[in-house]
Amino acid sequence: MFNNLLSPNAVAVIGASPDRSKIGNAVLENLVNQGFQGKIYPINPSYEEIFGLKCYADISSAPGKVDLAVIALPARLALSVLQECIQKGVEFVIVVAGGFSELGGEGKKLEDSLKEKLKGTKTRLIGPNTVGVLFPHSKVNTALTPGERIWFPGEGQIGFISQSGALGLLVMDSLAENGTGISGFVNIGNRADIDEDDLMEMFLEHDETKSIVAYLESISNGEKFFRTVKHVNMKKPVTILKTGRTPEASAAASFHTGALATDNRVLDGILRQVGVVRAYSEVELLDFGRALAYARPLRGKRIAILTTAGGVGVLTTDLLTTEDSRPALAMARFSQQEIGQLKQHALPIASLNNPIDLTADGSTLSYASILNILVGSENVDGIIAYALPQTPKIDTSVIDPIAEASRKKTVVVGVIGNRLTGNLMVEFEKARIPAYPSVQRTVSAMKALYLRNMYLGRLLNDH
Amino acid sequence: MTTETEFKPGIRNITEFEAKAILMEYGITAPRGIVFETLPDKIELRFPLVLKVSDASIIHKSDVGGVKAGIMGIYDLLEEYGAMKKKFPNSEFLLEEMAPKGVEFIVGVTRDPVFGPVIMLGTGGIYTELFHDVTFRRLPIGRPDALDMIQEIRSGVFCKGFRSTKIDCEKVADLLLKVSGMISGGKLDIVSMDLNPVIVSAAGAVAADAKISFPV
C-alpha cells in the first residue's frame, strides 16, 4: 500500500527553484544529492531547466506516472495544486507549507478543504506543515533543510515517525555522528490524512525496518492508535516518546479517579497494555530503537557485567539493580564451576564476582575468553560489555569478540570516553551492535530489552 | 480536590446507596445497608455500623462531617443519628454494616478525552490523595491486564504477603474484571466512578464506598 512512497519510480517537486532562498530549492537538491535513481520532475512554469533537469510548467505536463509529488509552495496555492495532482493520479503528495490547522481559523478551513479534496480519490497526503520524508534505501530525500546544514542518516533499520519536523531533523543530524542509519523518516506534520497509525502499518510491512520509533505530541485517534500499536508491536518493536503532558487536564474533576487521570498516567498504563516501551527523551527514543532493532531478545533478567574499569562496573550494578521508571534487573550469579573457568582466563587481581572487573591490566585476549564463558553460561540472560580502549592491553579489536558474543546472546555495549572511542562507536554501529556512550544509557537500553520481552511474552499469551 | 457540594453541568450524581445497588447487579459485593429519613425502630444489621448522609448532591461526605464509622451499639447509634440529623435536617441517611478490615484499594473509571473509558486501580482510602499510587488501563481489560495492574501499584505487595498481611489478589482481579464488564460495550453509560475504599480481606473484596456519575 505504501510501496510507492517507500520506493517511488518518479518524484515531482512542485515549486522547484534554482533560488537558494526557496524551499523548493532545498527539496530538489536533497533529492538529487541523495542519489535518487528514479525520474525527477521539477515543476515550475518560470524555468526550462533546474540543476540540469528538464523543468515542467505543471504536474499534468510531466511525462508518465508520478508516484510522489512534493508541493513546496505557499499554503494558499496548495489546494489548486493538490487538485492537479489528484487529476494526474499522483499516489502520494507531501504538502510542505505551514499555515493550516496549526494556526486555527482560516488555516483550519484550508486544511479541511485539502481533506475534502482527497475524499474518494486514490491520492494520500503527508502533512501539511511537514519537513518531509527520508528513505535512505530508495534514496528518497524530500527534506526542506539545505543539505549543507545537516547530516542525513544512511541506510539502517529504524523507522522513525515524528510529529515535530524540527526535532526529527535534529535527531537525525545527531544520529549521523556514529553512523546510525534509519530505514525511513516521516514527519507527519498536521496529519490531515496520513497519521502515525498508517505509518506504523507502513513500517510493519517494510522489510528493512526492524524497529519503529515515534515522537508524538498528541494522538490522532485513541481507539485506532490502541488497536494499531497493539498489533504492530506484536510483530515489530515500537518505542514511543510522547510529550505535551497536561497534568492539569482533569484536575477539576470531582471524583478521585477523574482527578488522577492525567493524560501522562493514562498513557503510561495504555502503553503497558499494548506492550510498548516508553521513552522519556529523544535520546532514549533512538537508543531503544537501536537496541530493539539490533540485539537478540533478552529472555530473562540476569545480567552479567564485563568491564576493565571497576567504577564503571559498580555504577552499572547500582543503576541496573535499581527500580526507576523501569524495573530493576538482577545480577547474574555464576556457578562454582564457572568461577573456576573464569579464573583460568583472568589475572589474579581481577574481580570475578559479577561485575567482572579485569582491571586496567586486562587484555583483549582475556576479555574475549571471559566473554565466551558468559555466552555459554546458563546463569546469564544478557551481557553488558564495556569496550574501554583507554588501557594499553585493550585495543579496538575488542569489537570482534563482542560481535561474536552478540550473535549468540543479548549484548549491550558501553563505550565511555572520547579520544579513542568515537571510532569504536562507529564500528559497533556498522556491526549493528547497540553501543552507548554512557553507563546510564547502556543500562536503560538493557532494561528496554527486558521490558520488550516481558510485554511480548504477555501479549502472545493473551492470544 | 474540591470539598464543597458541587453540581457540574451535564453530570448527574446518584447516592451511594443507588450506586451500590448497581454494583450488586454486576456481582460486586457491597456492605448490607438501609436508607431512611427517620431512624426505624427495628434494625436488622450487625454492629459495628457506619452512618452516612445520603444525598446525591454531597459528593465528599466525610469532608462535611457526613460519615460516622465504628458505631458499636444501639445507644451509640441513637446519639450519632441525632447529631447527624441536626447537621443535615433535609437529607436521608444510609446505615451500613462495616466491612471487615483489610487492604484498601481504589478502583475507578473515568472517560479519557483521547482513549475513552479507562479503569484505574490504586492504593485506596486516605492514601489515595497522598501517594497518587495508581495505574490505568483502557477498557475493556482481560485478566492479565488486571494482574499487571495489581503488580504495578505498591499495595500489590500484599498479594505476596507483607508484615503478616496477605490477601488474595485474584479477588482484586475479579473485581476489576466485573467493573470492566459493567462498563464495556456501552452497557452502563457513566461519566465517572470511584470505589474507594475497596476493602480486600479474607472475606473478599467489598466496595465500602461508591460514587457513580452519569451523563445527563
Image: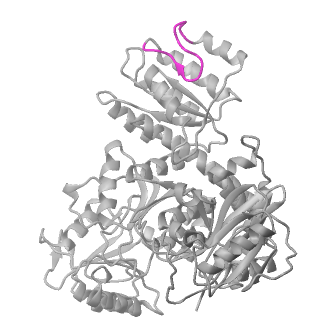
Q: Residue at x 79, y 72 (%)?
A: B28
In screen coordinates, is A438 left or right of B177?
left
> Picture coordinates of residue A181 (x, y %)?
40, 51
**In the figure, A76 relative to A3: above or below?**
below
**In the figure, A331 relative to A232: above or below?**
above
Residue A371: in sight, yes or no? yes
Residue A58: in sight, yes or no? no
Residues A285 and A362: in front is A285
Give the quadrant of residue A277: bottom right
Residue stretch in magenta: A346-360
Residue B1 in magenta stretch = no
**In the figure, A143 relative to B53: above or below?**
above
Give the quadrant of residue A388: top left
Residue A359 in magenta stretch = yes
Residues A288 and A260: in front is A260
> Picture coordinates of residue A182 (x, y %)?
42, 55
> Picture coordinates of residue B62 (x, y %)?
59, 69
> Picture coordinates of residue A286 (x, y %)?
43, 51
- Count of numbered circles in the view: 0
Q: Main secondary structure of the magenta part?
A: loop
Q: Which quadrant is the C terminus of chain B positioned in?
A: bottom right
Q: Residue at x 54, y 41 (%)?
A: A446
Q: Residue at x 26, y 78 (%)?
A: A98
Colour setup of the view:
one colour
